[in-house]
Image (tube, rainbow, N blue to C red):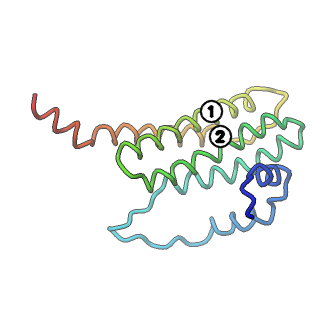
Amino acid sequence: MKNTDWSGERDALLAGDHLPFQQRALNRASEPVASYGPEQPRNNILEKTRLFALRIIAFTRTLREAGWIGLSEQLFDSGTAIGAHMSEAQQAESRKDFLHKTRIAAKEAKESKYWLSLCRDSPHLPYEQGLWEECDQINAILGTIIKRTIENDPKRKKAASKI
């Protein structure tokens, strides 16, 4: 029977058992990216959230080693969930489903910004320069995606044209 409990995997990553995985992931991130044709534009938000998640994994290890286990788990969960939700949004069944998943990703980004602001502003917590700013950029991109998805809704345009 297959084990579906993911808490052990998260704990292993936070404990530092992820180094070989992280090294492979960072190596893949520096590999040349396949060129995209006009029919398949490059999806920058997926790439950006994936790289952000890898930075969060490394940083939460630092937090855990400094004794901030609860905070590291909160940040790990929210920081890695952003990209997971955006990956799910790519397979959305409808515009409404896409919007819902993107809004959840934006909520996770806002939560991550909160935890990172505590780390940045507290003299008692470790902090990695640029993480909060990167999360802020992701949050702004997600806000734009949400706004444009709503603005470009054909139902909304049809209702506006009747007025």
Q: Which mark is residue 111?
A: 1
Q: Nearer the viewer, residue 95 or 83?
A: 95
| Rendered location of residue 120, percent (x, y) | 73, 31
Q: Residue at x 70, y 50 (%)?
A: 55
The N terminus, quarter of image? bottom right
Question: Quick one: SS at disc 2?
Answer: helix
For marks 2 and 1, give the CA distance.
6 Å
What kind of residue is marked 2?
Ser
Above/below status of 36 relative to 93: below
Using a 10 Å C-alpha cutoff, classify the residue at mark 2 as few (fewer than 14 neighbours), some (14 to 19) or many (20 or more).
many
Q: Earlier in the sequence, mark 2 or mark 1?
A: 2
| Rendered location of residue 27, percent (x, y) | 69, 68
Q: Which mark is residue 140?
A: none
Side of 105 where 11 appears, left or right: right
Q: Residue at x 53, y 41 (%)?
A: 105
Side of 13 where 107 appears, left or right: left
CB contact under 8 Å: marks 2 and 1: yes
Q: Residue at x 45, y 58 (%)?
A: 43
Residue at which label 2 appears: 78
Q: Quadrant of residue 158?
A: top left
What kind of residue is marked 1?
Glu
Q: Quadrant of residue 68?
A: top right
